[in-house]
Image (spheres, grey):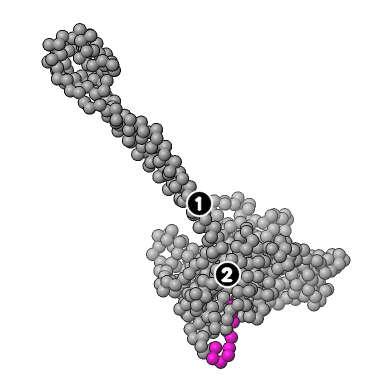
Amino acid sequence: MKNLFKNLLLVAILFVVLSALFSFFVGEKTGTAQTIPLSDVAQKIQAGQVKKISVRDNTLTVTDTDNKTWTSEKEAETSLSQSLANLGVDKTKLGTVNIQVSADSGNSALWLTILINVIAPFLVIIALFWFMSRQAQKGMAQTFNFGRVNLKLFTNPKERTTFRDVAGAKEAKEELREIVDFLRNAKKFLDIGARIPRGVLLMGAPGTGKTLLARAIAGEAGVPFFHISGSEFVELFVGVGASRVRDLFSTAKKAAPAIIFIDEIDAVGRQRGTGMGGGHDEREQTLNQILVEMDGFDRETNIIVVAATNRPDVLDPALLRPGRFDRRIVIDLPDVKEREDILSLHMKNKKAAQDVNLHRVAQRTPGFAGADLANLVNEAALLAARKNKKQIEQEELLVAMEKVILGPERKSHVLTPKEREITAYHEAGHALVAAMLPNADPVHKISIISRGRAAGYTLKLPVEDQHLYTKSHFIDELASLLGGYAAEEIVFRELTTGASNDLQHATDLARSLVTEYGMSEKFGPISFNVSGGMVFLGRDLGVERDYSERVAQEIDEEVQGFLRRAQETAKKILTTKRKILDAIAKRLIDAETIEKEEFESIIANFKVKKQRRAQLQKEHET
């Protein structure tokens, strides 16, 4: 588009120049004076009113004694004096007039005609051919460069990233220091006969810092860092991806020692043999070329291929065998200490108040990746700027956390008084059931302010990061999820659509208890092959169920049993603690938000403690 606009501009300039030339020549020939017949000129001469006559070809420019100017035309075959004499002008009167005859302008008219009718079209044709040849040359250049890879090379010292710029991921950084040491001093490893891994695969959830770690390896080692995405290899035409792979490794070998970083390698490295596209499938040919190039590394080649993916399960086994990506590093989500370090790292270039407690924010953000925490800090800075504050305070960080989790506040979403009451009892039901059960996560905040698609929310967070969960924890969480549903049923004798999301999560959790975790007393330690993922290339397009229809019906009944028991537990708690439920709901209607300390004080005012679920179950059975 840039070249098209440039060419159109040049053509427009050419036409403007030709128009200016035409106007110049024509403007010389035609004036702005009034045109009168030659007979009138004769009368003015006879009356002594003409001072000067300029003759140019057949055109007369007449100037009278008052310096007024007219134009006229004489006969082409007759001279001016003869024409005037024929009109009765006295020779004596004509002798008093200053007659000036200009040179014949026939040559100018001829050149003007040639310019307009011959040269101008010729120039336009030459310009068009020139533009077409330039476009053809560019097209040929693009054709020859079609197989060239679009590499991004990071060598600027100012943009250097080191392990200091990566908070958390302690084990991953320790593993990668060996790669850095090899790039710095390869001879130490080669002398002892060691072979450094040719490929390093970084596996982790989105936003955990895989790309940042790859750049930190290059920054620590001080070597060129070639960055490319896996999707840039895949093209419509067969063979282009393989050509780009060859160009990538050829370029990197010239700059060795170096690092090649392939982001989202699952775009091109998925399992082969799905039967779609056959052996000439472009993606498969590209993958084959990557395998061949990695096998072609010499023992002394100082090139390490680092790849990143959040879907290691779909990669082709040939990529993961020894000699290719044989070093696999898992980057987990950060724990509470690592989240605090990441927050501190992102707060370095921000103006924060002295009383900001990043540990409290880290406690409230389990499951947040590094990118989520960076977004949280940025949202807090934007919020403080909108409030015209000079510093980021604790309030902005907590509000930003809720915005990242649930979405922005919908202040325009005004609930009716009845809807506010239903929402207040719904959220109070969640919070109260969670507070009464010993294995449920503690409540940190309750609100009936709309955020995202939720009319209200109850923020429950674990005291510390958990990696293993017990059956009793899941059972209590099921009851807590159904607390809002049970509260609507008890208080209003009517159900609303507000519990739809809770029911979905509760059903998914109950089905996982039966089919994945082996926590069903009826089925025992067995895992059922239930497809919960999406169909993708590189795997079977369909999943065969390894159990019968009768077992499927029993699974549904067992899932329903978990949900029924959780509902009864929630109803039992809310019925016996109805006064506390009313107090929490009333406070929510008045204040819209209850923080953890206020919620615990409301519970403490009624002098109750967390009850054991076994006791509640026993009372229910009785």
Image location of residue 359, percent across then percent down: 51, 75
Seen as rendered, the residue at the extreme top is 88
Spatial CA span between label 2 and label 1? 27 Å
- Picture quarter containing residue 490? bottom right
* Element class at badge 2: helix
Determine which residue is flagged by label 1: 136
In the figure, 54 relative to 164: above or below?
above
* Numbered disc in front, either 2 or 1: 1
Residue 610 covered by magenta stretch: no
Neighbour tally class for label 1: few under 14, some 14-19, many 20 plus, Cα within 10 Å: few
Determine which residue is flagged by label 2: 246
Q: Amino acid at mark 2?
A: Arg
| Comes first in the chain, label 2 or label 1 | 1
What's the residue at 52%, 75% (across, down)? Answer: 253
State the mark number for residue 69. none
Instruction: State which region is magenta.
Output: 190-201
In the figure, 421 relative to 463: above or below?
above
Seen as rendered, the residue at the extreme bottom is 192
Confirm whether residue 526 shows in the render. yes
What's the residue at 60%, 74% (across, down)? Answer: 293
